[in-house]
Amino acid sequence: MTMMGIDPRTLTEEDLLRELRHLHKTRHETFLHGPDDALAHHTSRTSVLEAEYLRRHPVRDIDPNRLRP
């Protein structure tokens, strides 16, 4: 599958965060009702955007309340 959309490395921080928010918001609907190609594209795009976020922020602010014992 070829990547569609703007190369995440060229996005501003604001644009990257906006794109991630949109993808996370639409994930459930795409998963339940999207055709296979839409789900595959959504998964791929989410993966490359999340990887770019982690590249930019290798040390994230971890909420201690989210940790499991």
Image (cartoon, rainbow, N blue to C red):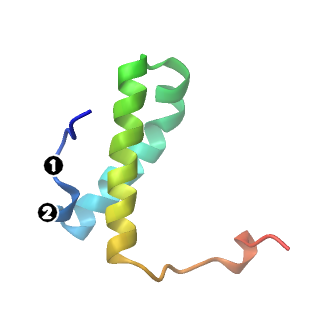
Residue at 19% across, 64% down? 9
Q: Rounded to the nearest whole Å, what is the CA distance between mark 1 and mark 2?
A: 7 Å
Residue 69: x %, y % from top left: 85, 74
Residue 48: x %, y % from top left: 33, 53
Q: Is residue 12 left or right of residue 53?
A: left
* Residue at the far front in the pictured view: 1
Q: Label 2, on which residue?
A: 10
Residue 18: x %, y % from top left: 31, 55
Residue 41: which quarter of the image? top left
Residue 15: which quarter of the image? bottom left
Q: Label 1, on which residue?
A: 6
Residue at 74% across, 73% down? 67
13 up-or-down from 33: above or below: below
Relative depth, front residue between 29 and 39: 39
Residue at 42% across, 79% down? 58
44 up-or-down from 19: above or below: above
35 up-or-down from 61: above or below: above
Amino acid at circle 2: Thr
Amino acid at circle 1: Ile
Give the total number of marks visible in the rendering.
2
Residue at 52% across, 28% down? 31
Residue 42: x %, y % from top left: 38, 36
- Please say if the residues under marks 1 and 2 sit with CB atoms less than 8 Å apart: yes
* Residue at the far right in the pictured view: 69
Q: Indicate the secondary structure of the residue bearing disc 2.
A: helix
* Quadrant of the snapshot with the N terminus: top left
